[in-house]
Image (cartoon, rainbow, N blue to C red):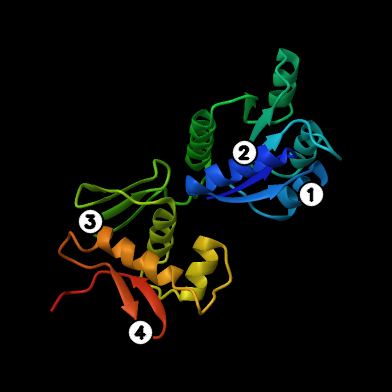
Amino acid sequence: MRLLLIEDEAKLGEYLRKGLSEEGYTVDTAINGVDGLHMAMELEYDLIVLDGMLPGIDGFAVLAALRQSKATPVLMLTARSDVEDRVRGLQSGADDYMVKPFAFSELVARIQVLLRRTCMHQQSPEPTILSEGDLELDLIRRKATRAGTRLDLTAKEFNLLALLLRRKGEVLSRTELASQVWDMNFDSETNVVEVAVRRLRMKVDHPFGTPLIQTVRGMGYVLEARAVG
């Protein structure tokens, strides 16, 4: 899922970007209200984490402008702790409000709640559980299981498996995997995709009877069950 983080404190912004990425989210960042509002209006995000005190346009003005046309969930994250500020934020359209300093684990938990709530209210929500055969991936709880056994995946492995499951039966090139999962242009000198797929297979396929992650020579990878033999 894709998040927009609008935060002008560079150190905090990088800490949040890194932490949320490790939680498996794709995170875009903006360091002022003008750029943040532009990105929020022009691009599609599952949730926005919005600082209240920003240069250019403050968070409340960004929120007011956004709510003119978009209902993207917004979690306000600000040093303003007065009751009046919290009420103002919520009445302006924020879906949640956290005061700095905060615990990162609580921020992640609140993001998960907002995303789960959004999925429940969408008429045609994206499935939050992906599956193929006995393999199941819970996107909200960040949990992967096969044949009822919990798989211990890294954040990148989880994202890679989610992409393969979303587009199961479709051959995905190394270039596309590198772009979608690592947000990088494919470099033929790097073997990051091959290494990640090999490690993922060790966890998803090797302990079980039926391999699901297939190599298509000269083209890429596809997730689908094939008969062994």
Q: Which residue is mark 1?
A: 35
Residue 130 in the image: above or below residue 80 = below
**CB contact under 8 Å: marks 3 and 1:** no
- Residue ID at (53%, 39%): 118
Find residue 134 and name its label.
3
Residue 71 visible somewhere in the drawing: no
The amino acid at mark 2 is: Pro
The amino acid at mark 1 is: Asp
As helix, strand or loop, the secondary structure at mark 4 comes to loop
**CB contact under 8 Å: marks 2 and 1:** no
Left or right: where 162 falls relative to 7: left
- Residue ID at (64%, 44%): 14
Q: Looking at the image, how many numbered discs can be counted on the residues?
A: 4
**CB contact under 8 Å: marks 4 and 2:** no
**First in sequence: mark 4 vs mark 3:** 3
Q: Residues within 10 Å of mark 4 (few under 14, many from 20)?
A: few
Q: Which residue is mark 4?
A: 217
- Residue ID at (81%, 34%): 58
The amino acid at mark 3 is: Asp
Left or right: where 2 falls relative to 133: right
As helix, strand or loop, the secondary structure at mark 2 comes to loop
Q: Residues within 10 Å of mark 3 (few under 14, many from 20)?
A: few
Q: Position of residue 204 (x, y in %)?
A: 27, 59
Q: Position of residue 53 (x, y in %)?
A: 78, 31
**CB contact under 8 Å: marks 4 and 3:** no
